[in-house]
Image (cartoon, rainbow, N blue to C red):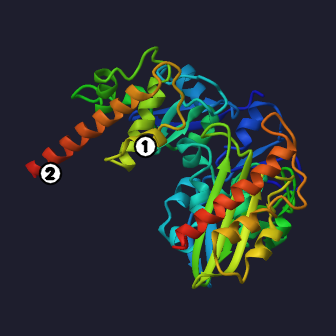
Amino acid sequence: MTETLPISVTVNGTEYRYEVEPRLLLVHYIRDILNLTGTHVGCDTSNCGACTVLLDNRSVKSCTLLAVQADGCDVTTIEGLAGEEGLHPVQRGFWEEHGLQCGYCTPGMILSAVQLLQRNPEPTDDEIRSGIEGNLCRCTGYQNIVNAIRWAAERLREAEASQTAKQ
Amino acid sequence: MLEGDEEAKILAGGHSLIPLLKLRLVQPSQLVDIARLPGLSYVREDNGAIAVGAMTTHFDVERSGLLMDALPLLPLTAATIGDVQVRNRGTIGGSLAHADPAADLGAAALALGAEFVAEGPAGRRAIPAQAFFVDVLTTALEPAEVVVEIRFPKPAGRVGADYLKFNHRAIDWAIVGIASWLVFDGDVVSDAAVGLTALGSTPLRATGVEQLLRGQKWSRDLAQAAAQRASDGLDPLSDRHGSAAYRLHLARVLTERSLIAAAARAGQQ
């Protein structure tokens, strides 16, 4: 198959236009064409969640999407989370609470946590565990990841509160 | 695009089809992505029924207040599908039209008496759930037909629902799943429907259980007695996840638990 289709995808705020084969998976588009290798391929069977990115603000497994399905969409990868003020609170949480060991699952785990905290800013530990049900970690035993997400949830709520207080 | 090409496939959320493509288990001549067709994602009341657009994601079904009030079986079932990322992307129409007998929504659609609205070159037609599921991965849809909406009758009365699934790990496919749907008039079960997942080549109804429940005063003893009939007439697969005998045992045990959970949601202990 040599036929290609033009697609336009905005990744981490930058619009990219490429001609791609219709069979190309989104994760390979991100890694091999855009050279954003923070998004990992773990299982390639939609189980492990290492390839999780946000597509129009919804967490998806980029190994189970064709790049052409993302045409016209906004994608956020791990490279797009940190801002001018430094690491995203979820990234800082993983740092502070030792939420990673080998780091392979971490980008996907962090994006799932970001999705969870957008939908539920005050999750219980059980809700945190449900929120990362689609992400496998083979090092940590998950407890430090749960701690990291709880830490981030607290920082995000503090930031929200001080923002409200200023207004 | 589908007319005259029986090997073409429709791509909705892609969470059943893309894994099969990657395994080379299906090799369609063309993929027609319908995700961008406008107006296929909604939940609304329509002529005394609840209508759900075919491209409504599992997540949107899970979070729909209208469904949680009127048809709680649907969001409770959707919430058990795969994981967060899968529910963000997978669609109700795609999952049902894919017709995997281990998929959860089929049992709920059967139990709720759903009607599938299909559109094709010959126009629109309605297919009752009982006639929709034909065999493993096979539905009553014609090659050029697409499910555009699934309609559910609105129940009259106090309802209780539960979907109980037994699987290896949280995100796995069901080894057995039970969809329980009870309608109460006081403490009498005025209507009952039980859908079965992964107990045959299509989703099924446990009619023996339903008959025993209907018109009876609710009690746990009633649930226990009715659940004994959950395995009547079934001929499930044996595979590495469980033998047929194990699945039949699970059918009875899970039906009892699921009925009790459904009744509890309607305030019946």
Quadrant in which the N terminus of chain B appears: bottom right
Residue sitting nearer the eye, B10 or A59 = A59
Residue sitting nearer the eye, B158 or B216 = B216
Identify the element where label 2 is drawn.
Answer: helix
Q: Is residue A15 above or below residue A140?
A: below
Residue sitting nearer the eye, A128 or A108 = A128
Q: Quadrant of residue A85?
A: top left
Q: Residue furthest front?
A: B221
Quadrant in which the C terminus of chain B appears: bottom right
Residue A124's spot in the image, x, y percent? 36, 45
Q: CA distance from mark 2 to mark 1?
A: 28 Å
Q: Quadrant of residue B110?
A: bottom right
Identify the element where label 1 is drawn.
Answer: helix
Residue B85's spot in the image, x, y percent? 54, 42
Disc nearer the start of the sequence (2/1): 1
Specify the amino acid type for callout 2.
Answer: Thr
Disc 2 target residue: A164
Residue B97's spot in the image, x, y percent? 76, 56
Which residue is drawn at the image coordinates 41% and 20% (left, top)? Answer: A100
Disc 1 target residue: A126
Residue A81's spot in the image, x, y percent? 35, 31
Residue sitting nearer the eye, A58 or B264 = B264
Tell me if mark 2 has few (under 14), some (14-19) or many (20+) residues whose alpha carbon lies within 10 angstroms of its own: few
